[in-house]
Image (cartoon, rainbow, N blue to C red):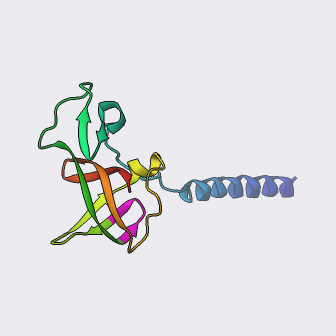
Amino acid sequence: MKHLYLALAATLLAYGAGAGLASAQQAPPAPTDVTPSYSDLTCGTWVNDEWVPNGKCPPETTRLRHDNVSGTITKVEGHLVSLQQTNRTVVINDQPALDRKATGKVGVGRQVVAYGYWLDGTFYATSIY
């Protein structure tokens, strides 16, 4: 009987220690990638390199402004792409273009024109040609 109690105690102890160990080894929560709530597709379209709003979104401000940037890709890190322009380097977020499958090959040395918008100081490319 004494052996039964020892076996039961050992099992409970192992289970409790294992459960504690398992909870300590849980993966941290995935980082949330903050994406803008603005959707370029619902606000207008690009026509001959000019942004044509459709009236469904607020007017452009210093916070939100449609634009295009061009340059040579010098670095790619995930959804961030560095473009070398004549007098500066611009880092753009191409996640919206990736989501739309509108980037082509994003590789160092490629000369591109990225269409999209500036939102709070970050350029979001909705298409890259």
Q: Is residue 113 visible?
A: yes
Query: Where does the image place residue 127, in percent across and percent down from the top left?
Result: 38, 50
Closer-to-camera residue (121/73): 73
Residue furthest left as drawn: 62
At horizontal 13% and vertical 39% (from top left) the residue drawn is 61
At horizontal 43% and vertical 55% (from top left) the residue drawn is 103
At horizontal 32% and vertical 38% (from top left) the residue drawn is 40
83 lies left or right of 64: right
Query: Where does the image place residue 90, in percent across and percent down from the top left?
Result: 24, 64
Query: Where does the image place residue 25, in percent across and percent down from the top left?
Result: 56, 59
Region in magenta:
75-81
Among the 4 quarters of the image, the one containing residue 35:
top left
Query: Where does the image place residue 3, in percent across and percent down from the top left?
Result: 85, 58
In the rendered image, the vertical position of residue 73 relative to residue 47, given as above or below = below
Question: In the picture, which quadrant includes the C terminus?
Answer: bottom left
Residue furthest right as drawn: 1
